[in-house]
Amino acid sequence: MNWAALGLGLIAFLIVLRIIWWALGIQVIPNNRIGIVEKWNSPKGSLKDRIIALHGEAGYQPEVLRGGIHFLSPIYYRVHQMPLVTIPQGQMGYIFARDGEPLPPTQTLGRVIIEGRTFQDARAFLEGGGQRGPQREILREGTYAINLALFVVMLEDGIHYLPVNKGDEQMFGRMANVIHERAGFKPLVVKDKDDKTGVVTVHDGPSLPEGEIIAPTVGDKPNNPNYHNNFQDPEKFLKAGGYRGRQYQVLAEGTYFINRLFATVELINKVIIDVGYVGVVVSYFGEKGADISGDDYKHGELVGRGYKGVWDTPLMPGKYAFNNYAGHIVPVPTTNIILKWMKEETGVHRFDENLSEVAIITKDAFEPSLPLSVVVHIDYRKAPLVIQRFGDIKLLVDQTLDPMVGAYFKNIAQTKTLIELVQERSSIQDAASLDMKVKFAHYNLELEEVLIGTPSYSEKHPDIEKILTQLRDRQIAMEQVETFSRQQIAATKERELRESQAKANQQTSLTESEIKIAVASNEGKAEYQRSLQDASKIKAIAEAEAEREARIGIAKAIAVEEQVKAYGGPQFQVLQVVMDRFADAIEKSGVEVVPRMVISGGGGEGKQGGYSVFEALMAMLLSEKAGLMKNIGESRTPSTMDPEIARMKQQIMGSLGKKAN
């Protein structure tokens, strides 16, 4: 087998087959692609100023070939296969028309010809007056069979078009970049949580009339036949009389499919008026309104809502989708405003950040700085009057209140010495509050209070501090006197307290002592009564005893007298008694009358000096006279008396003495 001849035959067959295929003009187009027909030649000639041949001329044909087998002679036609255009969900496609009527000077985008299917029927677009250039209508989600020789489709992921000119890629690339910069391939989403408002600027349509800066609202009502649904239908917006430029109408929360070549959207913050404030609206938009401020108000006009000027009714606390290009809102506090004439301090609202202490000159030529605080209130109903008159609160403070307050206190200071200014601060403050209420009311302000601080010194006048130091020392001395007086009172009270506490602590002992005293007193009284009773008893007993003794004595006396008589005389009676007592004494003492031993005194046995004791006694007792003892004791002295007799005398006298005792 000749393989070479076989190969050559196969190649020849394929060539012949290709020639037949070409000659028949067979075009197989898949279902996901289209065929753009380009006509090579035509008896009707070529196009002059157009790209799409509507009448059989040579050039790109308006109709496209869909999926299938088509027969077109290659002698006359060339088919360019292009993919279908698919736009994902949540995206948008922009169209640029290469052919159509030229745009007039008042337009920037081509008008919509057949809403919803303008770009899938190229013939209808061109015959209906479609305009070349970027189009107002956009493509939403879906798949489209678009003639890419006429229309260029710009998507987020790329540009779909049939290359015609060498500079197409660069030109369409620049346009796509503009859309990217405006985030135009995705719908606009205004989120409620962001507190944003969309301000729309339209780039197509007639210009604004002279003197206007904001386009009026048109076609914003759903029942309007030209309702443009928040600029999502450019054609209806323009039919409703919309102007190009920044629009007064704003976009609230929601999702908007807006052609960013037709209109751009700027998100701005909502206007939030906090509690304690009202918002005075200064509108740049609207018709001229009637002045409703009254004949007595000479500082400007107030108008109603919706008119150009200062609105007479302020906005209450809340959130507002306000177009700040059409005006601005001046927040006015309705709570008390504290203005501090102090260089290093400012109030919460910071309206006083340019204020400093008031430089004054006192009557005695001192030049201190006087710090002040003024409390002001603005009635919310008068807030528009204040703004119309001064522009804003800070200008009011800087240009009016500051010079007015400074001049007032300069005048006051010239009538007071430095010490008077310090000591009479309260009265000056009260007078200033009354005087300045009238001045503030003239500016539609309500003065609540004026507070005066302590004058401060500067390097120019350091002596002010010396005077203030002297005043402080004087006050300290007075306070010390008062303190010492109070301390003295406190010490007295403390002593009384401690005495009371001591008494309280000793109350039990005092009570017990008092009880003991009372008991002792009662016992003494009882003892006294007992003593009185005992004394009475003793007295009675003594009297009875005395009576008894007396009677006994009398009886004894009578008996003795009788005894004496019986004995023959008193000496015998005495002797009898002595003997009885002597006998009793001997009996009780156990003394032996006759001694066991007799010591002789040289006169013989049992004698002493010639006498025994017993003999002496007997001799004495038997004396005839009762005075014998005396005679014995006195007539004889120890020198003459016999020693034995003397000794016995002493014994007898001693015994008699003891007996007597």
Image (tube, rainbow, N blue to C red):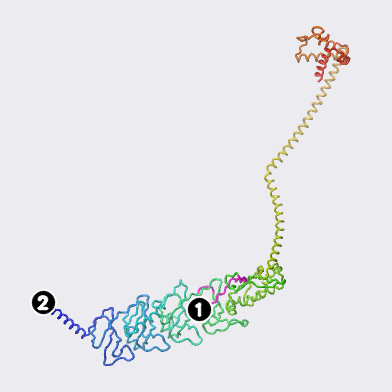
Q: Amino acid at mark 2?
A: Met
Q: Residue at x 27, y 79 (%)?
A: 31
CA separation in Å, label 1 and label 2: 92 Å
Can you tell which mark lies on residue 324? 1
Q: Residue furthest left?
A: 1
Which segment is the magenta one? Answer: 316-343
Q: Secondary structure at mark 2?
A: loop
Give the x, y percent position of residue 118. Answer: 35, 84
Can you tell which mark lies on residue 451? none
Circle nearer the N terminus (1, 2): 2
Q: Is residue 199 visible?
A: yes
Which marked residue is nearer to the observer: mark 1 or mark 2? 2
Picture quarter with the C terminus: top right
Picture quarter with the N terminus: bottom left
Q: Amino acid at mark 1?
A: Asn
Q: Is residue 43 left or right of residue 455?
A: left
Q: Which residue is mark 2?
A: 1
Question: Can you say whether 430 is above or below 32 in the image?
Answer: above
